[in-house]
Image: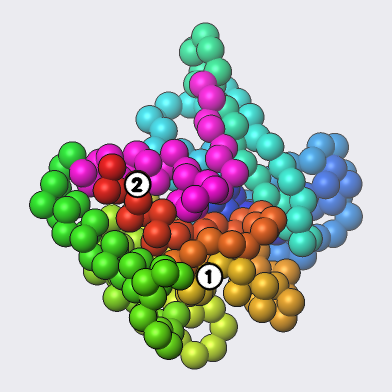
Amino acid sequence: MPVALVTPYGATPSSFIAVASDAKISPIGEAVEGSVGHDRIQQSEAGQSIGEAIRYWYKLRPGDFERIDVDIQVQDDKFYLAPTGYKYAGMRQTRTIQRPRYPLSFNDQEQSELWGRQLQHVRKTQPDLWRWSLEEICRVAKDHRPDTKTPYVKEEDLLRASGPLKALGVELGPYVGKGFDCQALFQFLNYEPYTAPIEIKKASRGFEYQQKRYSPLELSRVVILCAQHDLPNVPPNVDVIQLESLCSVMAH
């Protein structure tokens, strides 16, 4: 079964395969009968072990792992593997890896610790860029508020915030007419870059259109960029970035 590794930003596809105790992976990459005797994560086409992949994403120091604790959830025929702790050989205690529910969400209902740390980093290290980003995001958000919105404004207008969002660590790619609206590159703190599809909505409830028409595989990881957040029961692996909430928090 394919494995999605949960990183500090959320799940990402991998080349690892979850293999049961009575199976093995053949030289051509197919699951066949085997007798290893224990369930395991196999590299398949991955160029590194699962431990090294976790070290890469979480920026853990060099050293031999004695063990890595993980939480596994099965969803849409895929293993979601989230590291929850690790212990180096010779170390007395296990260190915890926090697993947030919605790591890339910043809205009126959910504001992730990762986003909070990133905003504090930008504010401290680049105060002029911080002030400009605040002004620009609030300018766009104002044009989409129910009481002050510009008549007939379209959802694509939110792309005016692409410049300040890039200053905060979110680089939006080209807006396309098929599938999700664009791809985004997230670069927070000292973590490695992370890509995820972006769906742009004036109000996040509009994502119900994609929920009704897209396959579970397509919905397995996506970030909604919106002005107003009103989507009830946000699905797992779906994050919501709300410009109005960014404006409000950054202003204080």
- Residue at image coords 47%, 45%: 111
Residue at 45% over, 51% down: 106
Classify residue 118 by image quadrant: top left
Q: Residues within 10 Å of mark 2 (few under 14, many from 20)?
A: some
Residue 249 x, y percent position in the rendering: 35, 46
Q: How many marks?
A: 2
Dot 1 amino acid type: Ala
Please report contact status of discs 2 and 1: CB closer than 8 Å, yes or no: no
The residue nearer to you, when weighing 34 against 89, is: 89
- Camera-nearest residue between 111 and 29: 111
Provide residue 53's location: percent of width, then percent of height: 50, 45
Q: Pointer 2: what residue? A: 249
Q: Which residues are magenta?
A: 95-123
Q: Is residue 233 one of those drawn in magenta?
A: no
Is-magenta flag for residue 119? Answer: yes
**Residue at 65% across, 76% down:** 210
Question: Residue at coordinates 81% horizontally, 37% vertically from top-left?
Answer: 38
Q: Residue furthest bottom?
A: 177
**Mark positioned earlier in the residue sequence (2 or 1):** 1
Sort mark 1 into few (<14), some (14-19) or many (20+) by Cα contacts within 10 Å. Answer: some
Amino acid at the residue labelled 2: Val
User: Cα distance, mark 2 to mark 1?
Assistant: 19 Å
- Image quarter where the C terminus lies is top left
Q: In the rendered view, does 57 fall on the left or right side of 31?
A: left
- Pinpoint residue 74: horizontal percent, then vertical percent: 77, 51
Q: Which residue is mark 1?
A: 203
| Screen quadrant of the N terminus | bottom right
